[in-house]
Amino acid sequence: MKAAVLFAQNQPLDVVDVDLAPPGPGEVRVRLAATGICASDWHTITGAIPSPTPAVLGHEGAGVIDAVGAGVGSVTPGDHVVLSWVPSCGHCRYCQDGRPNLCSVAAPALLAGTLVTGARRLSYQGDPLYHYSFLSTFAEEVVVDEASCVRIRSDVPLPVAALVGCAVMTGYGAVVNRAKVEPGSSVVIFGAGGVGLSAVMAAALSGARYVVAVDPVPAKRHLAAEVGATHAVDPGETDVGALVRSLTGGDGADTAIEAVGRTELVEQAFAVTRRAGTIVCVGVLPAGTSVALPGPDLVRHEKIVTGSLYGSSRPRTDMPRILDLYADGRLPLDRLVTRRYDLDDINTGFKDMLAGHLARGVVTFGGLT
Ligand SMILES: [Zn+2]
Ligand SMILES: [Zn+2]
């Protein structure tokens, strides 16, 4: 099958023929319909997020179950699935606590380059390749852990479903699961890419009175305004803090979401939030960086600063629910798909992403879409 392989850091991906072994016990083979291009893949190409090479990247996908290994009970061939990059074990304290995104087994092994069991099913000319985020979706087919498969309704377009596998779950979950945004509240969202726009939609759906999207790219601001932002501003032109204070009677926002991954934006998110407000950090900050918060305010203002991994999700509950809301016309997720690419053109997709042209670029595969 065809797959886009990262043979070494800071090189373009090579689309080549690779071999995929049959699914082992507890594993599943999925024929992919679509895979989104995410900034995390790029950070892996550059080495900012270290993961072993040579590898097939990609961690945002959806498709149809093609074959199942021994002992697989939750899915059968023909099922439509979104792929989860946290194949939670179901048994550890976090899984038992209803926090499967923090699973003690899956979360620490995310960038090990294997399936949860340590197995590798990909190879190129006889040499094993590493997996990526347990998924490796830049390929026509994947073999993944059964626990990575989230069964979904079969009447939603799979390119839209694919985005639920990373960007949508991350942004929506930051708002709904982590911040628990309330009707009438005010929310500021830094970054209006796939994750930030998903947060905008979720904040609007949650009944926020003000949804302020902050992004320097005009096209992203335009889209943010169309999918629910009450204000979409250029941080180079607008004093975000002054705007938020003017909207909230001088108080500050109830919630700020940082969806870019820059320390100065976390600090700005802290500054624009009211006393006892919540700051949710979603963008992964570069390794080795630290955030500087004003010490006295940290105590006196009782603000809550929290991360959110994968939208603090329970994938098997949240992902089908998100797709129901999409099907009901209440979450316009299809607006996130800016452009489609063939796998052969995936490097163009990365170029377009880096140029700021995309909410999301999606690679689609023939046959299923
Ligand atoms: Zn991602
Ligand atoms: Zn677990």
Image: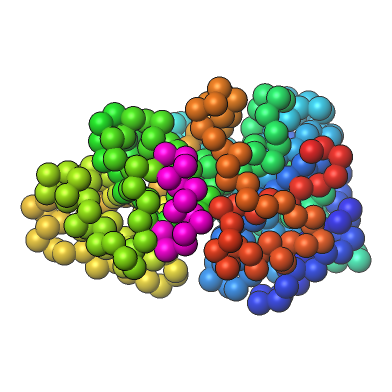
Main SS class of the magenta portion in the image: helix
Residue 224 is one of the magenta-drawn residues:
yes
> Is residue 368 visible from the viewing direction of this image?
yes
| Rendering coords of residue 16 (x, y %) | 86, 64
The x, y position of residue 127, in whole percent, is 85, 66
Residue that appears at 80% across and 55% down: 342
Q: Where residue 63 sits in the image (x, y, percent)? A: 75, 38
Q: Nearer the viewer, residue 14 or 19?
A: 14
Q: Which residues are magenta?
A: 215-228
302 versus 262 height, above or below: above
What is the number of callouts on the image? 0
Residue at 26% over, 58% down: 240
Classify residue 247 as left or right of residue 364: left
The answer to which image quadrant residue 150 occupies is: top right
Residue drawn at (40%, 47%), measured in percent from left and top? 308
The C terminus sits in image quarter: top right
Q: Which residue is more in the foreground, 139 or 342?
A: 342
Left or right: residue 161 compared with residue 181: right
Q: Is residue 224 left or right of residue 211?
A: right
Colour scheme shown: rainbow
In the rendered image, residue 217, in percent from the top left (x then y), is placed at: 47, 62
Relative to 271, 177 lies left or right: right
Q: Is residue 348 above or below residue 282?
A: below
Work out whether 67 lies above or below 174: above
- Can residue 273 be found in the magenta stretch? no
In the image, 68 versus 16, the foreground residue is 16
Q: Quarter of the image holding residue 78?
A: top right
Name which residue lies at 20% across and 45% down.
247
